[in-house]
Image (cartoon, grey):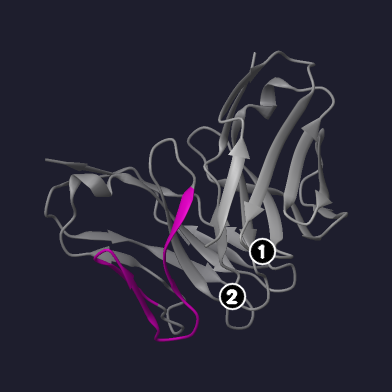
């Protein structure tokens, strides 16, 4: 069945460091892929998305490219800020039931 | 624009007591609605989803139930809470079809004591 495997955390980086959070997926067909972010005590916010192979989603300096050949959707940011500290979830748009399949989440802490 | 509300924000309930969490969406019609649970330090677990009034699909058997009495209202209930029901409950809405995007409410933190 459809699933998402996400890099385990926690991840701790210094401000202005480069960020990569790995995400790979298993799916039949051509799913949409998403990254959501959850700030402390809040719900999830859609960060970026890609709906087909080779699409690049981007928002707030974050980017992720839909790679069909490697079934991956890694999240990257060139220079993280303290305000980026949050939990990041990779998700796959499943077929049939209109559901999202979420990864387990990766907690990022950025220190000044 | 669309907004989603959840209440209460925080709830502390004793074991065996009933539960009712409410979620409402504004600014859209006939959305798909979802209830998720997030246990401490863990990922999201889909509990229920609904594609229309009175239509509920359960993903995980448990002592929780859901109802959708109106188009933009989704209620999560329990007759008797268990300790294991503690967690962060998130409601979400989506338009379904091919995009699968979902938009989340602020969540309810439930502690069962």
Q: Quadrant of residue B111?
A: top right
Image side of residue A98 versus residue A34, left or right: right
- The x, y position of residue A70, in whole percent, is 42, 79
**Looking at the image, is A40 positioned above or below residue A2?**
above
* Residue drawn 78% across the image and 57% down it: B71
Out of B29 and A46, give the one closest to the viewer. B29
Q: Quadrant of residue A56?
A: bottom left
Q: Chain of mark 2?
A: B
Out of B74 and A95, give the one closest to the viewer. B74
Labels 2 and 1 share a subunit = no
Which numbered marker is on residue B99? 2
Out of B89 and A5, give the one closest to the viewer. B89
- The x, y position of residue A95, in whole percent, is 69, 74
Q: Secondary structure at mark 2?
A: loop
- The x, y position of residue B3, in whole percent, is 55, 54
Mark 2 surroundings: few (<14), some (14-19) or many (≥20) residues within 10 A: some
* Residue drawn 45% across the image and 55% down it: A45
Tags 2 and 1 touching, CB below 8 Å? no
Q: Quadrant of residue A12?
A: top left
Q: Secondary structure at mark 1?
A: loop
Mark 1, residue position: A99
Image side of residue A60 versus residue B111, left or right: left
Q: Chain of mark 1?
A: A
- Bounds of the magenta segment: A44-65
Mark 1 surroundings: few (<14), some (14-19) or many (≥20) residues within 10 A: many
Of labels 2 and 1, the one closer to you: 2
* Residue drawn 74% across the image and 49% down it: B73
**Looking at the image, is B18 positioned above or below residue B68?**
above
């Amino acid at each position: 069945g459809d699933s998402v495997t996400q890099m385990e955390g926690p991840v701790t980086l210094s401000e202005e460091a480069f960020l990569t959070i790995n995400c790979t997926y298993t799916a039949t067909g051509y799913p949409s892929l998403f990254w959501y972010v959850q700030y402390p005590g809040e719900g999830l916010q859609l960060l970026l998305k890609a709906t087909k192979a080779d699409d690049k989603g981007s928002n707030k300096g974050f980017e992720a490219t839909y790679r069909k050949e490697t079934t991956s959707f890694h999240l990257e940011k060139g220079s993280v800020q303290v305000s980026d500290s949050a939990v990041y979830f990779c998700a796959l748009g499943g077929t049939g039931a209109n559901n999202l399949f979420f990864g387990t989440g990766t907690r990022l802490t950025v220190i000044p | 624009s669309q907004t989603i509300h959840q209440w209460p924000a925080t709830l502390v309930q004793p074991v065996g007591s009933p539960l009712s969490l409410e979620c409402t969406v504004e600014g859209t019609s006939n959305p798909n609605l979802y209830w998720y649970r997030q246990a401490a330090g863990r990922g999201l677990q889909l509990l229920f989803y609904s594609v229309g009034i009175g239509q509920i699909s359960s993903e995980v058997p448990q002592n929780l139930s859901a109802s959708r009495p109106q188009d933009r209202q989704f209620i999560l209930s329990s007759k008797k809470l268990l300790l294991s029901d503690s967690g962060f409950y998130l409601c979400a809405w989506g338009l379904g079809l091919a995009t699968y995007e979902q938009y989340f409410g602020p969540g309810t933190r439930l502690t069962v004591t």
